[in-house]
Amino acid sequence: MPETANISKVTDIINDSHIGMFTTINEKGALVSRPLAVQDVKDDGDMWFFTGEGTSQVAHIGADPRVNVSFGKRTEWVSVAGTAEVVRDRAKIRELWNQAVEAWFPDGPDTPEVVLLRVDSDSAEYWTSPGGTAATVLQWVKSKVTHSRMSVGESGTVEL
């Protein structure tokens, strides 16, 4: 698959999933994940998220900006590695503001606590399993009967 098609596949999975597990590195070097809703995904895989200034992810990114964000929905999964930064630009916050964010920050985009996380994506890996659960179960049964490795779909690595 051409690289542009792979990048498109990655951004499609992210946009279809919408909620990602956002992983940072804490002060002890342990990985910490939490769900965050992606607000915008650029064609190059860069992503934007809303969060609060006082959250652990903001503190972790300040100490070590390396992150991973994984998304999945039924038969498609993607894992994106990159570098994050905390963005406090009120104009950008207003640009990305929407009603879903308002549920978390009811005082609006000028709430001092509101910040953005921008992930500069470096690479992504994706996996797909066409046909859904039934096809996956069928492939599992076939692998057991034939004593062969299960093959359920497509995967790829993308440099972003």
Image (tube, helix red, strand yellow):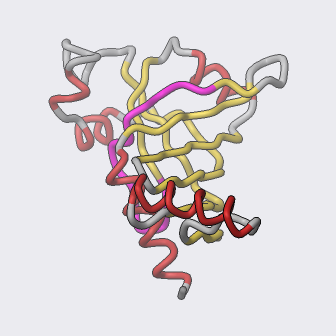
Residue 68's place in the image compared with 9, above or below, is: above
Q: Quadrant of the N terminus?
A: bottom right
Q: Position of residue 117 (x, y in %)?
A: 48, 36
Residue 136 in the image: state x and y as whole percent: 50, 58
User: Which residue is nearer to you in this view: 14 or 136?
Assistant: 136
Look at 62% across and 61% down and name the residue there: 125
Q: Residue 45: percent from the left, percent from the top?
A: 49, 61
Left or right? Give the position of 1 relative to 135. right
Main secondary structure found in the magenta portion? strand
Q: Quadrant of the C terminus?
A: bottom right
At x 65%, y 40%, the residue is 67
Q: Is residue 41 magenta?
A: yes
Q: Position of residue 24 (x, y in %)?
A: 66, 31
| Magenta region, residue range | 33-46
Residue at image location 65% in from the left, 30% down from the top: 61
Depth check: give the residue in front, 114 or 80: 80
In the image: residue 139, left or right of residue 83: left
Q: Is residue 159 above or below residue 36?
A: below
Above or below, 8 relative to 49: below
Residue 160 seen in the figure: no
Residue farthest left in this picture: 99
- Residue nearest the observer in this picture, 82 or 108: 82
Q: Say whether residue 138 is magenta.
A: no
